[in-house]
């Protein structure tokens, strides 16, 4: 029911200007990611990114993210050498996502008014419209992941920010500092960014809506 209401609200979003701080506060949903290293508290912005927030709520309430992990840490010491390095952690159900999950409509930052600042939570994807259960949290600002020309991703669509860490950045930083390598990475993965001992996601809970 919540998903339906939020998705219907997205039909009105195209006629609205990007979300400002006041509108985010009025529509905030809170959530907690409990990991083996501690708790990360979030606020989510359904007014700005209704489809993405609804998807996260649906998978959290279904328990699809419980028992998942943070399995990737991208840092200046292990990022691609030919680009400006970024700093983030990635996790969720698993690197390839939940097999039966359908991709959701992409909500670019140029439309939502959100950005990949420190503590932002955003959806991992391949092509736009393929995001399902995998997400990442920024350790540092990195506007190159926003939508627009000249960004990191050649398709210029960027990634869909949908919330912000409100407490637990020390947990995010601890996850980001875990040893990484290629041992557990997919066969075609080129950079040593996979966490050697993935950090377990004990649970993801929606604490208000």
Image (cartoon, rainbow, N blue to C red):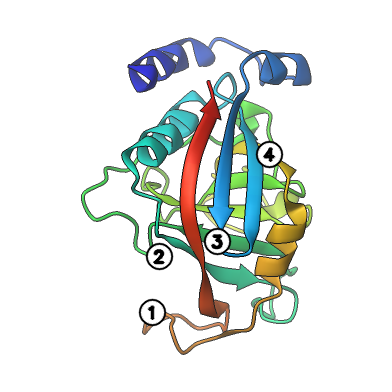
Residue on which the image places disc 2: 95
Measured in 3D between alpha carbons, the distance from the residue under mark 2 to the one under mark 1, in whole angstroms, is 9 Å
Can you say which quadrant of the picture contains the N terminus? Answer: top left
Say which mark, if any, is on residue 186. Answer: 1
Q: Single out the mark in the foreground, 1 or 4.
A: 4
Q: What residue is at 55 percent from the left and 70 percent from the top? A: 72
Q: Quadrant of residue 6?
A: top left
Q: Is 93 situated above or below 44? A: below
Is the C-beta separation of discs 4 and 3 under 8 Å? no
Q: Is 91 situated above or below 135? A: below
Q: What residue is at 45 percent from the left and 17 percent from the top? A: 10
Is the C-beta separation of discs 3 and 1 under 8 Å? no
Circle 1 Cα neighbour tier, 10 Å, few/some/many (<14 / 14–19 / ≥20): few
Measured in 3D between alpha carbons, the distance from the residue under mark 1 to the one under mark 4, in whole angstroms, is 29 Å
Q: Report x, y in % for residue 75.
A: 71, 72
Q: Quadrant of residue 188?
A: bottom left
């Amino acid at each position: 029911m919540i998903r339906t209401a939020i998705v219907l609200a997205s039909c009105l979003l195209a006629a609205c200007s990007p979300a400002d701080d006041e509108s985010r506060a009025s529509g905030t949903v809170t959530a907690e990611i409990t990991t083996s290293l501690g708790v990360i508290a979030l606020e989510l912005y359904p007014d700005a990114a209704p489809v993405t927030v609804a998807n996260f709520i649906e998978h959290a309430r279904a328990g699809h993210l419980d028992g998942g992990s943070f399995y990737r840490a991208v840092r200046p010491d292990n990022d691609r050498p030919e680009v400006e390095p970024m700093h983030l952690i990635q996790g969720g159900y698993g690197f390839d996502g939940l097999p039966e999950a359908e991709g959701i409509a992409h909500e670019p930052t140029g439309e939502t008014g959100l950005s990949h600042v420190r503590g932002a939570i955003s959806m991992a994807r391949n092509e736009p419209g393929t995001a399902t259960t995998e997400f990442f949290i920024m350790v540092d600002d990195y506007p190159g992941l926003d939508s627009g020309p000249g960004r990191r991703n050649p398709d210029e669509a960027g990634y869909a920010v949908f919330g912000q860490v409100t407490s637990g950045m020390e947990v995010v930083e601890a996850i980001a500092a875990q040893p990484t390598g290629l041992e557990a990475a997919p066969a075609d993965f080129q950079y040593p960014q996979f966490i050697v001992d993935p950090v377990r996601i004990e649970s993801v809970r929606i604490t208000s809506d």
